[in-house]
Structure formats: C-alpha cells, structure tokens
Amino acid sequence: QSLVHKLGADAAVDMAEELGEDLGVFPFVVGGVDKSDPEYVQAVKIVCLNWAIFQAHRLFFVAMEELLQKHPVDSVDEDGAPFWSGTRRVPKPLRFIPLDSNEDEVSAQQ
C-alpha cells in the first residue's frame, strides 16, 4: 500500500516535508541535473546514508538515553513497584560504529 493510503494525505505530506527539511533540496533537484550521472548518484547516496544514520542515532540511542535518564534502571513507578518490570524491559541504547572504525565495540552488542 502507498504511504498516502497508510498514513492519510496530510500525514504523508507532513512526512515528505520533514524529510525534505532533513535532506535539503539537493537530492530532489528537478531539471538541470543528469540523475544518471555517477557523481550525482553517489552524492545522493551519501546524503541519504547520512540522514539514515542520523535518524537511527536519534531513535535508537538518543531516545533510549533520554528514557533511561527519565526512568533509571532502579526507578520505581507511582505504586512503588520497579518501573522496569513486567512487560517493560530496560532499553539498551545502540550506537552506530562504522565498519572502518578503530573501536573494538559492535553497536548491536551495546
């Protein structure tokens, strides 16, 4: 199904506008650009990869760190029970480490 069908037209437009703000107009220049030019294709790939890495960092590291700051591992809920119990599991923030990094860590193991 299309994004418009799944989200509705207004939500799809909002999402496209946000993506455009994040990426800038560069990848979507209309006219005057040979979209089959290998340099253009490579530049678009780099912009998109950087955007994806930024989004993953924001969603899987920053958001998890903020959640853990708000609810530390040893925090309790309003009833005095451990906050991280039952269906709630302590999140593990994931960090992106490029393959060519000198770090010995693997992001999925953090």
Image: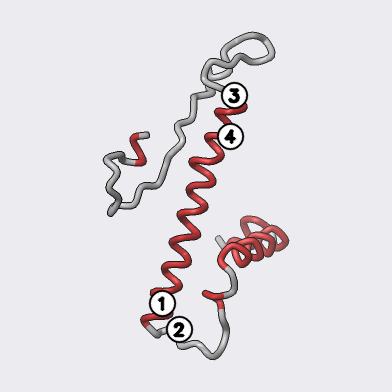
Question: Earlier along the polypeptide chain: callout 3 or callout 2?
Answer: 2
Would you say the residues marked 4 and 3 are in contact, meaning their CB atoms lie under 8 Å apart?
Answer: no
Q: Name the image quarter holding the C terminus.
A: top left
What number is the disc on residue 71? Answer: 3
Quote the CA–CA distance across marks 3 and 2: 48 Å
Would you say the residues marked 1 and 2 are in contact, meaning their CB atoms lie under 8 Å apart?
Answer: yes
* Amino acid identity at mark 1: Val
> Which residue is painted at 68% across and 64% down in the image?
13
Viewed as shown, does residue 30 lie left or right of 52? right
What number is the disc on residue 35? Answer: 2
For the residue pair 89 and 43, the one nearer the viewer reads as: 43
Furthest toward the right, the residue is: 10
User: Which residue is labeled 1 in the image?
Assistant: 41
Viewed as shown, does residue 17 lie left or right of 29? right
Would you say the residues marked 3 and 1 are in contact, meaning their CB atoms lie under 8 Å apart?
Answer: no
Question: Earlier along the polypeptide chain: callout 3 or callout 1?
Answer: 1
Quote the CA–CA distance across marks 4 and 3: 9 Å
For the residue pair 14 and 7, the one nearer the viewer reads as: 14
* Amino acid identity at mark 2: Lys
> Which residue is painted at 31% across and 40% down in the image?
106
Would you say the residues marked 4 and 2 are in contact, meaning their CB atoms lie under 8 Å apart?
Answer: no
